[in-house]
Image (tube, rainbow, N blue to C red):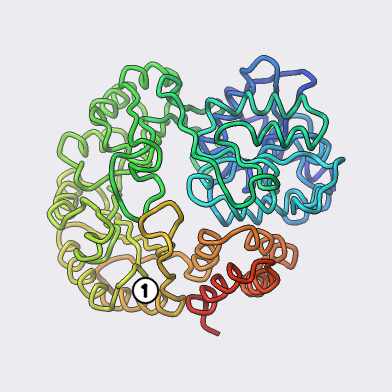
Amino acid sequence: MAWESTTPIRRRMSLEHGRIDRSGANAIALAYPSPYRAGMSSLGFQQVYRLIQNSGDLRCERFFLPDDAKLFEVGPLSYESERPLGDFPLIAFSVAYELELAGLAQMLEASGVPALRRLRAESHPLILAGGPLTFSNPLPLGAMADVIVMGEADDLVLGLLSELRAEPDRKRALEKAAATPHVFVPALHGDVMPSIAKADVANLPAFSAIRTPDTELSNMFLIEAERGCSRACTYCVMRRSTNGGMRIVKAETLLATIPQDARRVGLVGAAVSDHPKIAEIVNALADRGCEVGLSSLRPDRLNEEFVGALKRVGYRTLTTAMDGPSDRLRELLERRARIRHLTRAAELAKEFKMKRLKLYLMIGLPTETDDDIAECAAFISDLAKTVPIALGIAPFCAKRNTPLDGSEFAGISVVENRLTLLRKLLRGRADVRGTSARWAWVEYVLAQGGMAEGEAVWRAASRGGSFAEYKRAFAEALSEAPRARVASKRLQVLQATGPES
């Protein structure tokens, strides 16, 4: 079994380009609670890796959630040394969103480290965590992590890691971490979280160190075009009030940072298409012969110059966000997308001979009715006369730190019925694909929850991780919560918005 575990590691290592090999005693485990293909496509994970490996006094060894459940028999192994995760005194996890908490629990348990913070002893590794999840609600993560870096870790992660790595006494290490701005120590802070860290714009952009074909973004060099967002979308954690709005990376800095041999480039950010020189940047990369992907395209930013540039760098499908199914709901979301912008996007897709226009939107929004779905179907039917349309649909999940925080989940049957209605109304006119309403509900409970919900993830994962086990574990954890007022409120959420039996 050990041989089976190391074979994919060695194969993947042989395919990596740009890896920063280091030796030394001050090793830190850098872990991602999803498989390698997802972890190595994460710019945040790659940024922390690059910072540590270039630090001088620290080095990191990478760990990922094993692809095959059988490989948990030996536990996660380091990609750099094939050592077990539990051998490292300090383990740092990058967590992108709520459903990855299960992977974190599985990785720790398979390594002989209790996943729950309250069950760990002095002899166990110290668990640090950060990542995009901390911009919204890291309280469920607090059931597992000893130390949580809030927000943008670029400027403080190295100092914090060095301090924790050098302090052998667990109690003193936690006290030092708790005294660090923007660092959350659940054992000492309880439910009171510090403010979110903001990186110095002079230290941007983040960019990847390693390129490999064995990822979701095969051989793609990832780099920020901007950080944050200037918009005020009411559902979005990265709205302009979260961390001071958008910070732009100068076009010349961005282009100078991208290696000349990079043939595939990913421009990353919450609002990449809002960069004032985005068309110029894309055209410059087209002149190099690059294929380019952008993480976000806003419909009101699409014009002939920009879409023409996208065509030059390999776009065959024009993808943008519709967000809400009706004008009324888009107003609720404070989106700038208007019918005229979406209509123009279809015209541009046709003009530049794109195969289709793909639109992302949410259903199950507050106050939504079947009439909103019918309006969506009528508009898409008309739009499909211009260009083939594909819809990517996700159930709405209210997030902390947004104006729509606290909004109820529409209900699994409600979301499924509206998706069925939309498919029926658009049959033969558009391709309609939706994500699971059940797992969106699990995400919602965690997004609105606390440490009791984090413990529930551990319970559900240890029982096989089925949806039924999540439902059972949430009810158990909340019924056992020590503060009856909080537990009662959350149980009402489960009963009122949860799945129908």
Picture coordinates of residue 202, whole percent (x, y): 41, 19
User: Going 40% across and 66% down the picture, which residue do you hit?
Assistant: 407
Please count the marks in the image: 1
Q: Eyeballing the image, is 88 above or below 251?
A: below
In the image, taking residue 335 as reference, residue 27 lies left or right, namely right
The quadrant where residue 13 appears: top right
Q: Mark 1: which amino acid?
A: Leu
Picture coordinates of residue 347, whole percent (x, y): 14, 51
Q: Which residue is mark 1?
A: 419
Secondary structure of the residue carrying tag 1 is helix
User: Going 20% across and 41% down the picture, which residue do you hit?
Assistant: 301
User: Going 20% across and 36% down the picture, which residue do you hit?
Assistant: 308
Camera-nearest residue between 378 and 439: 439
- Quadrant containing the C terminus is bottom right
Q: Eyeballing the image, is 5 above or below 418?
A: above
Picture coordinates of residue 319, whole percent (x, y): 30, 49
Camera-nearest residue between 353 and 212: 212
The quadrant where residue 395 appears: bottom left
Q: Eyeballing the image, is 13 above or below 3?
A: above
The quadrant where residue 362 appears: bottom left
Please identify the residue farthest to the bottom as the structure is shown: 501
Camera-nearest residue between 257 and 186: 186
Q: Residues within 10 Å of mark 1 (few under 14, many from 20)?
A: many
Picture coordinates of residue 70, whole percent (x, y): 78, 55
Camera-nearest residue between 249 and 148: 148
